[in-house]
Image (spheres, helix red, strand yellow):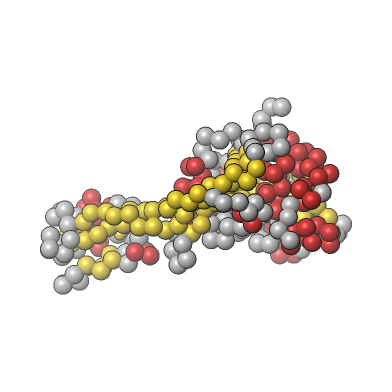
Amino acid sequence: MKIAVASGKGGTGKSMVAANLAFTLSQSEPVTLVDCDVEEPNLHLFFPVSATSTDVTVPVPVIDEKACNRCGKCGEFCQYGALTVLESRVLFFSELCHSCGGCTLVCPNDAIHEEPKRIGTISISAPQPGLKLISGTLDTGSPHAVPVIRAVKKQAAEDPVVILDTAPGTSCPVVEALDGCDACILVTESTPFGLHDLQLAVDVAARLGIPVGIVINRSDGKDKETLRFCIDHDLDILMTIPFSREIAAIQSRGDLLCRARPEWQKDFCALFTKCRSLAGVDE
Ligand code: SF4
Ligand code: SF4
């Protein structure tokens, strides 16, 4: 079962919910926590243990200038503008390349071959019995988050219970992380920005056909508009976490709510049960 933890707006506490959910579940069954927020992974901060890292690479074209007669076919084919054929040479802009492999296929002179280019890393650790943490990290300056997310998801493909922490927002990296999930927890806060971005996130999940439930974080008890939106869109409130100085202090020192205050574990167990129900998984 794969549960995504997402949010339209950044800073709502999405990673905190994912980490506490995985921590709690791992007390009773094997859980894999996947950090798909590859531009700014942070789950390892909650679980500071050593990890093994491997590179994520994508194939990029390399032009053999001696075999190339500047026919122009590769430049015409590339829809991303990554190849420009000049009279004297072919220019390749690697940051625009999507590694589709098409230019290699259309070159009539076998003047293009592919070589791997590193775009990020995957780190895998076992912070405690029952818990596996897989984090993707995009290299600074690399524009291609999606292949790194695909690579981290692949590492967890066969695992029985997977919690995926997505990037904030509703862009391609979020869609890639959500794809194939059985349920999605959307973490929000009761502010106008929070509600606006929640609406966008609900729309994306609906288009992907993923059932959604809501967690309201840092609630000050004045959640009327968020509750109204959820009623109007037939969305369950899975959990409400209060605005609390104590919770903020626990997080600011890099600790987990469920580790520092174990009484919260029953709430996160209940959250998981509701996610199973959302996903249509029988008890
Ligand atoms: S398609 Fe091949 S031969 Fe033609 S310009 Fe591109 S690399 Fe050169
Ligand atoms: S691999 Fe695809 S995207 Fe990259 S340069 Fe070739 S045609 Fe363009």
x, y percent for residue 71: 15, 62
- 68 up-or-down from 166: above or below: below
Quadrant housing the C terminus: top right
Q: Quadrant of residue 94?
A: bottom left
| Ligand 1 visible in quadrant | bottom left
Q: Quadrant of residue 113?
A: bottom left
x, y percent for residue 96: 37, 64
| Pick the front one: 207 or 246 | 246
Visible residue check, residue 209:
no
Visible residue check, residue 110:
yes
Quadrant housing the N terminus: top right
| Pick the front one: 227 or 137 | 137
Question: Which residue does the image show at 47% across and 66% down from the upper left?
Answer: 140
Furthest toward the right, the residue is 221
Furthest toward the front, the residue is 50
Question: Which residue does the image show at 67% across and 33% down from the upper left?
Answer: 29
